[in-house]
Image (cartoon, rainbow, N blue to C red):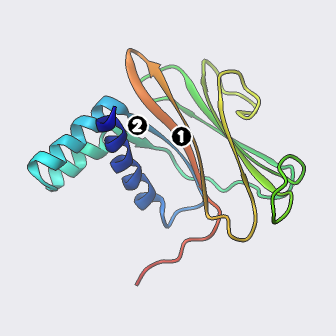
């Protein structure tokens, strides 16, 4: 299990780096076994362009999207699950009513679900994953993720949102 967690950590770093200058949210899928093999190859043979490409092949990144961060506005995107007839639906919504914190009552909800059809709202869909975090001027990044088996393979499916605009390093 340690190896799987390490493999996923490495691939999520790739995902974060590739999305660093993009618009705030993106959906991703990681083939867990493929990721482990790719990272093992990187560790055993070094970071050659071919090995990096092999590790990244285990991950599918979907186009980024800009959610509406206005209060109580739901933004939902659906994309096809790789090599499957299923659909990934991701939803983002802010609210000021569900989670009080030391800085206020604003929060950010992220939801993700994989189903036979696109869902109108991943936050309320069956068999979903939902995360909620406080939302203020210091909120930087939020993520929701879940594991699932599809076609006999284990996948990690996630939604990551960058709330603060990323600055380009010079």
Query: In x, y percent, where is residue 44?
Result: 11, 46
Are the residues tagged 1 and 2 within 8 Å (C-beta)?
yes
Is residue 162 shown above or below 57? Answer: below
Single out the residue that lies furthest toward the front: 102
What kind of element bears circle 2?
strand
- Decide: few, some or many residues near mark 1? Use Cα within 10 Å; few <14, some 14-19, many ≥20: many
Location of the N terminus by quadrant is top left
Residue drawn at the location 39% of the way across and 55% of the way down: 13
Q: Which residue does the numbered mark 1 point to in the structure image? A: 158
Is residue 110 shown above or below 86? Answer: below
| Residue 145 circle label | none
Location of the C terminus by quadrant is bottom left
What kind of element bears circle 1?
strand
Number of numbered tags placed on the structure image: 2
Residue drawn at the location 57% of the way across and 27% of the way down: 87
Q: Position of 87 compared to 152: left or right? A: right
| Real-space Cα separation, disc 1 to disc 2, in angstroms | 9 Å
Of 138 and 71, the residue lying toward us: 138
Of 99 and 163, the residue lying toward us: 99
Residue drawn at the location 67% of the way across and 64% of the way down: 139
Single out the residue that lies furthest toward the right: 97
Residue drawn at the location 42% of the way across and 52% of the way down: 15
Q: Which residue does the numbered mark 2 point to in the structure image? A: 30
Q: Position of 125 compared to 16: left or right? A: right
Of 75 and 71, the residue lying toward us: 71
- Decide: few, some or many residues near mark 2? Use Cα within 10 Å; few <14, some 14-19, many ≥20: many
Q: Position of 7 compared to 37: left or right? A: right
Single out the residue that lies furthest toward the top: 152
Circle nearer the N terminus (1, 2): 2
Query: In x, y percent, where is residue 169?
Result: 43, 80
């Amino acid at each position: 299990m340690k190896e799987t967690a390490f493999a996923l950590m490495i691939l999520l770093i790739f995902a974060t780096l590739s999305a660093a200058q993009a618009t705030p949210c993106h959906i991703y899928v990681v083939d867990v076994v493929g990721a482990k093999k790719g990272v093992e190859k990187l560790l055993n043979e070094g970071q050659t362009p071919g090995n990096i490409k092999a590790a990244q092949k285990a991950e599918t990144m979907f186009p980024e999207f800009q959610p509406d961060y206005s209060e109580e506005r739901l933004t939902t995107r659906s994309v096809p699950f790789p090599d499957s007839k299923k659909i990934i639906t991701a939803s983002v919504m802010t609210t000021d009513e569900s989670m009080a914190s030391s800085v206020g009552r604003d929060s950010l909800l992220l939801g993700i679900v994989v189903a036979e059809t696109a869902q109108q709202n991943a936050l309320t869909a069956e068999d979903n994953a939902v995360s909620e975090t406080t939302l203020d001027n210091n909120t930087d990044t939020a993520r929701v993720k879940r594991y699932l088996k599809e076609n006999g393979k284990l996948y990690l499916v996630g939604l990551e949102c960058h709330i603060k605009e990323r600055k380009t390093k010079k």
